[in-house]
Amino acid sequence: MVKLFCWWLLREWRYLKSWRWQEGTTWYFAFGANLDTRVLKTRHMRPLSIVPFVLQDHELRFDHPSSWQGVGYASVHASQSKQIYGHLIQLPDCDANRMDCDELVPFFCRYVRHEHEQDGHIFYFYISTVPTDNLLPTPNYLNMILSGLRLHPYIPADMLSHYQNHATRLPHTPTPDSEYFVQRGRWPNWLRTISGPYEIAMSRLLISHVRHWTIFGHFMEINSYYNKLGIDQD
């Protein structure tokens, strides 16, 4: 709970700091859900440039544990002669720092931010610190990836077909350490009590859409997402 609170404070601070434009940009290699520009918009990322790119000598695997048992997110692994098709995205430094929080890099160390250089390009991507076997992506997550790959000018037809026919798994049972994130009905009463007034106060203090930039808004978006899949969160 202490780590969660510290992560929350850091995340809120970085979101608030991003209101003030800062000098400096960073290139990020997107290979997962961020291939879908709608996801970037939901996260309030501000891409300055998006360039199709092929990461050499690496392989994409769905072995990063999610909040649901048996469900995995994408991660990158070094693998000779393999390729990953994705996008190089130029982000303001403040947005790249916010993304670290979204990917649970600070405190939770679920991913590590890896700096890489290829063909004169310097960029970063995230590598799972806890790769796990026998995980599958959800249909919705895979569709987010496919939405970007279908527009990729370099991806071979057989590689695109591989992802289109990849096995998937619907999320049903949350992992024990993630129930607070995905099941609002299991939040402690005090947390549910203050979440509403907190959102109202933040909205009035800043602007109406800031609720999507706060920790409670983030949890609510997760709840809404799984409700759309027809999964009971209570």
Image (tube, helix red, strand yellow):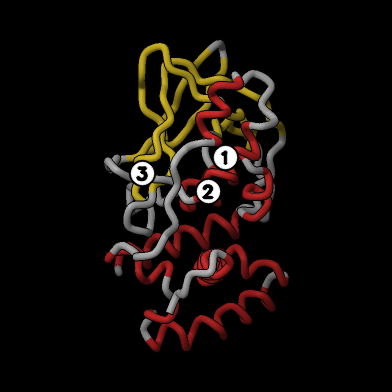
Quick check: marks 1 and 2 in contact, CB under 8 Å? yes
70 vs 1, nearest the viewer: 70
Question: On the rendered image, what quadrant is the N terminus found in?
Answer: bottom left
Mark 1 nearby-residue class (10 Å; few <14, some 14–19, many ≥20): many
Q: What element carries label 2?
A: helix
Mark 1: which amino acid?
Ile
**Residue 81 place in picture, x, y as percent:** 41, 12
Mark 2 nearby-residue class (10 Å; few <14, some 14–19, many ≥20): some
Mark 2: which amino acid?
Tyr
Mark 3 nearby-residue class (10 Å; few <14, some 14–19, many ≥20): many
Q: Is residue 49 left or right of residue 11?
A: right
In space, the residues marked 3 and 1 are separated at their CA atoms by: 15 Å
Determine the image quadrant of residue 161.
top right
- The residue indicated by pointer 3 is 64
Q: Which of marks 3 and 1 is nearer the N terminus?
A: 3
- The residue indicated by pointer 1 is 145
In space, the residues marked 3 and 2 are separated at their CA atoms by: 13 Å
Against 8, residue 154 (above or below) is above
Against 103, residue 118 (above or below) is above
- The residue indicated by pointer 2 is 141
| Of the two numbered discs 3 and 2 in the rendering, the one whose residue sits closer to the viewer | 2
Q: Is mark 1 on a helix, strand or loop?
A: helix
